[in-house]
Image: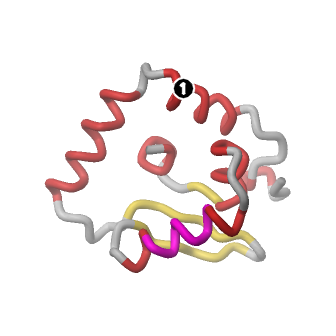
């Protein structure tokens, strides 16, 4: 849902927001990429992920509706707060 909300996120942003290890996050993203759910791009040493452009319209709608439904729930709000409070996010050219 964070990727849906933000458009694209670096693995380091997801590890920070979710409090999980980089290998765990990367493995889950690899599975999602293999399933055609996300696309990746490399920027230097960082891997960025976004939802796949090839997702069917019904899947995109489902993700959008799910995000709308969970936006006010504590687990999502905590993860989003962790993400937005991350120092040196990749846009600043230095990743945590």
SS state under label 1: helix
Q: Residue at x 72, y 58 (%)?
A: 21
Quarter the N terminus occupies: top left
Relative to 94, say whether 75 is above or below.
Answer: above
Dot 1 corresponds to which residue? 77
Which residue is nearer to you in this view: 51 or 19?
19
Q: What range of the chain is rendered magenta?
A: 25-31
Q: Position of residue 48 (x, y in %)?
A: 60, 65
In the figure, residue 81 lies in which quadrant?
top right
Q: Position of residue 57 (x, y in %)?
A: 16, 57
The answer to whether 39 appears left or right of 52 in the picture is: right
Asked if residue 45 lies in the magenta stretch, the reply is: no
Relative to 61, say whether 79 is above or below.
Answer: above
Q: Residue at x 42, y 26 (%)?
A: 71
Q: Position of residue 53 (x, y in %)?
A: 32, 67
Q: Position of residue 68 (x, y in %)?
A: 32, 30
Magenta: main secondary structure equals helix
């Amino acid at each position: 849902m964070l990727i849906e909300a933000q458009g694209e996120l670096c693995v380091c942003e997801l590890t920070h927001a979710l409090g999980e290890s980089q290998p765990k996050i990367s493995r889950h993203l690899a599975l999602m990429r293999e399933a055609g759910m996300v696309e990746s791009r490399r920027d230097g040493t960082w891997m960025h992920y976004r939802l796949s452009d090839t997702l069917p319209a019904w899947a995109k709608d489902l993700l959008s509706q799910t995000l709308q439904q969970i936006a006010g729930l504590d687990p999502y709000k905590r993860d989003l707060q962790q993400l937005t409070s991350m120092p040196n996010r990749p846009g600043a050219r230095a990743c945590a």
